[in-house]
Amino acid sequence: MDDPHTPDAPPADEAALLPLLEALYGGLTQDPPWESFLRALAEATDAPFASLLVATGSSGIASHVTPGVDPDRADEYEQLSDADPFVDLPEGQVVIFSDFVRHVPPRFREWLDKARAGQIMGVDLHAPSGASVRLRVTRDMSWPDFGDKEMALTARLVPHLRIALDLHARLTSTQAERQVFSTAMEGLAVATFILARDGRILRRNAVADRMLHEAGALRERNGRLEPGVGAAPMLDRLLRAPPPPGEEKRLEIAVPDGPPLRGVARALPPNAYGDGASLALFLADPARSGGPDPDSLRDRFQLTPAEAALAIQLAEGAALVDAARALDIAHNTARAHLRAIFAKTGTHRQVQLVHLLRTSTGGFTV
């Protein structure tokens, strides 16, 4: 039998810590994040539940993840979170509820009893954004108090929690920026291709998808981008020798019986997308109208011809009164059409509607 005290055997707390760290960093890309980590932490501390809450001051609870909890209990907590006395803990320190709280408001005590969560161990961390991140581990009052072992294990997690929270904030910001840029490209009718060095299409937006399906100057074959005969050498050269980082190269692709596609190529940093991406192409088609197509609007949103005609006017930037005049309809009729368009498109304001009409399904497809 192996001796547990040999130098090769990890200490008991290390053996408990390693799977928690694996779950913590692995949970960065989960939605919601860190469910597996919280389940593992609850198990490691012999508790029914572990929770991660993000509070944003006057805005209340921004997010609340508690795997396995009754959703009604979580909703009840968020409604009375302002009565929670177990907040504003010493930053980064593991604290026990009974050591910290001297008075429990009656309505919060009632919730604790219903939720069977009288024993609470917690840590508060303050994010650079000003948000308060609260880690809470809970037991029923009939269970033993949290002891030194559980507190020490949780304390070991604190520096890793800081790193993981910062990484998650950066990932979320990057994803939001990508979505904003993708939507902007859609609105400008710019086709975006992310290519590997061998010409494989790793990402493309909806405008690029349309450009490929129109079977003009570009097409997709075996997952690779194939330009027309005259432009193939140009693309090959770009893939073999992309522009220097931070620079771009203008390009032009001939189109049969029409004006050429014009755009720019930019080199991507190595492993920018984690999948060998090499080059980003941004192409505009001058032959394509930037406005939405009436037939496609009717098909997509089940608009009547009159509603589609009004939607086109609004998408082209006309005010409602000017659109009514252009269509030779009464202003009240235009307002009635607009209400119907809102209902059918799921929008609530004219600016939302115009944005929706000017963009496609959005995002990258693989």
Image: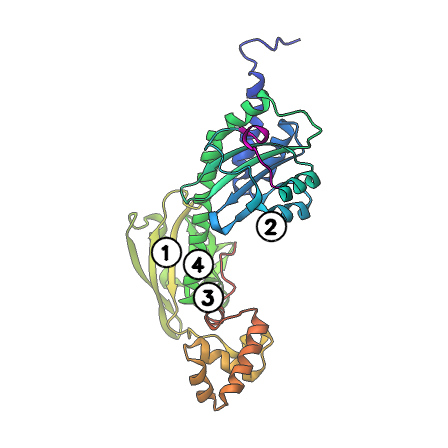
Which of 113/50 is in front?
Answer: 113
What's the distance in space between the residues labelled 4 and 2, CA to CA? 36 Å
Label 2 or label 1, whichever lies nearer to me, is 2
Q: Which residue is mark 1?
A: 235
Label located before the other in sequence (4 or 1) = 4
| In the image, residue 72 lies in the stretch drawn in magenta | no
Coordinates of residue 324 in the picture (x, y in percent) = 47, 86
What's the distance in space between the residues labelled 4 and 3, CA to CA? 16 Å
Coordinates of residue 58 in the picture (x, y in percent) = 48, 50
The residue drawn where x is 52% and y is 54% is 366
- Residue type, label 1: Leu
Q: Residues within 10 Å of mark 1 (few under 14, many from 20)?
A: many
For mark 2, give the secondary structure.
helix
What's the distance in space between the residues labelled 2 and 1, CA to CA? 58 Å
- Residue type, label 4: Ser
What's the distance in space between the residues labelled 4 and 1, CA to CA? 23 Å
Q: Which residues are magenta?
A: 95-105
Q: Which residue is mark 4?
A: 182
Q: Are marks 4 and 3 in contact (CB under 8 Å)?
A: no
Which of 190/86 is in front?
Answer: 86
Which of 280/45 is in front?
Answer: 45
